[in-house]
Amino acid sequence: MDPAVHHHIGVSEHLKEDFRSFLMNNRGDPAITHFSQDLERHLLLRLKTLLDLPQGSEEPSVGLQSPMAERVFYQKDTLYRHHILRVNYTSYDIRRLQDVLNPRTDHRDIILHRRRRLSTKHEYQYARILGVFHVNAIYHGPGHRNYIAHRMEFVWVRWFQLSDGHDIPAQQGWARLSHLSFHSLGDRDAFGFVDPKYILRACHIVPHFRSGLRHPEGAVSLSNLAQNGKDWHTYCVNRFVDRDNLMRYHWGLGVGHTSSRTSFDGLPSHQTDPVHLAQAHSVEVPSMESTREAPPNPDGDGNKEDDEDTGDSDYESEQESLDLDSSSESDEDASGERWGSGNEDYDEMYGNDDAQ
């Protein structure tokens, strides 16, 4: 995996989920109530950006209400599930590290910059991954030119919300750890979708044990997908789990956390690490190749996908330290795909308030 790439999801398509069967098999589960509608809106915004179509100032018109309605069709009506999501990030001391996320393990909580539409003072937003997917999506609507399918990766999440009294800027919260709780299952904002390139990294969220379980021990979950029967009343964000996580709460002091200090031409957070900024401003930077040998590939010949890995060791966080000054060759990004497919409408989805 190229360490300069923000994230990696396996390319295999052997873990198939028929879209209609997925909805039917989970009928009645609160997590599925708005799944189809929310996914289509999420993908519409990204497809229109990818195809350089105007976003418009209103919510996308989804469905078959009129001939001008916009639609997203899924090739073969199929979702492709993945077990592992690898996220590369630049640490506070300008090193490239990696987190491995797996929704089937406890290593499944993520941190993002808060969405612009949220009226909170805290700079971050937190979520628990329920699934990692990709679809081959086809756009149909005003301005469409063909029926070419585009691979679209997305992460299905359950959102955390800040507890009362904890909506304060990150750097002011040193008196106690930030407290979180899950939205109620019936809340419209309880579940959502995230473009994986907006994930900052994994985070460590632990139960606030004194608050107790939300439901009696052994209670049956209302949602098999969300497993809400195991919810605690309150969770704590453990910012002390490692040095990089700690420095994210010293807002603006982490040298590698450039998105906390400045913005460059309105670029969203996934495009504000040192390498991408240098490329955007025509500055030559050294290659980010490692100064040490890469760890052996557990897959042997390198052709097997992450989705086939079942060993517990692959589910743990992988730290791959890569010095920025390890080589004299400059990074090249001629394909334009290294840092994602253009600038999505960040205000609509996962806006970074620092990029103003």
Image (cartoon, rainbow, N blue to C red):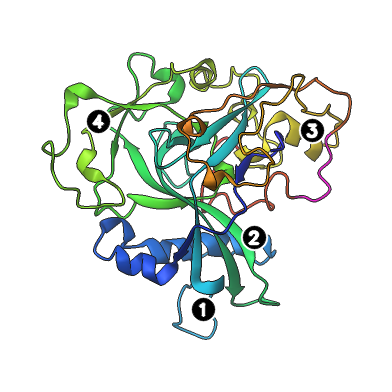
Which residue lies at the image location 59% right of the left edge and 65% below the top edge? 136
Q: Earlier in the sequence, mark 1 or mark 2?
A: 2
Numbered mark located on residue 268 in the image: none
Magenta region's main secondary structure?
Answer: loop
Numbered mark located on residue 278 in the image: 3
Left or right placement of residue 2 versus residue 192 in this view: right
> What's under tag 3, amino acid-wise?
Ala
Which residue lies at the image location 38% right of the left edge and 65% below the top edge? 22
- Asked whether residue 356 is in view, the answer is no
Place of residue 115 in the rendered image (x, y in percent of width and height, measured from the top left): 48, 44
In whole angstroms, how far apart are the C-alphas of marks 1 and 2? 17 Å
For the residue carrying disc 3, how many other residues have a C-alpha within 10 Å: few (<14), some (14-19), or many (20+)?
some
Place of residue 298 in the rendered image (x, y in percent of width and height, measured from the top left): 61, 34
Q: Earlier in the sequence, mark 4 or mark 2?
A: 2
Query: Which mark is in front, 4 or 1?
Result: 4
Numbered mark located on residue 49 in the image: 2
- Asked whether residue 83 is in view, the answer is yes
Verify CB contact (< 8 Å) between mark 2 and mark 3. no
Place of residue 299 in the rendered image (x, y in percent of width and height, measured from the top left): 62, 39
Place of residue 3 in the rendered image (x, y in percent of width and height, measured from the top left): 70, 33
Query: Which mark is in front, 4 or 2?
Result: 4
Numbered mark located on residue 234 in the image: 4
In whole angstroms, how far apart are the C-alphas of marks 1 and 3? 40 Å
Q: Earlier in the sequence, mark 4 or mark 1?
A: 1
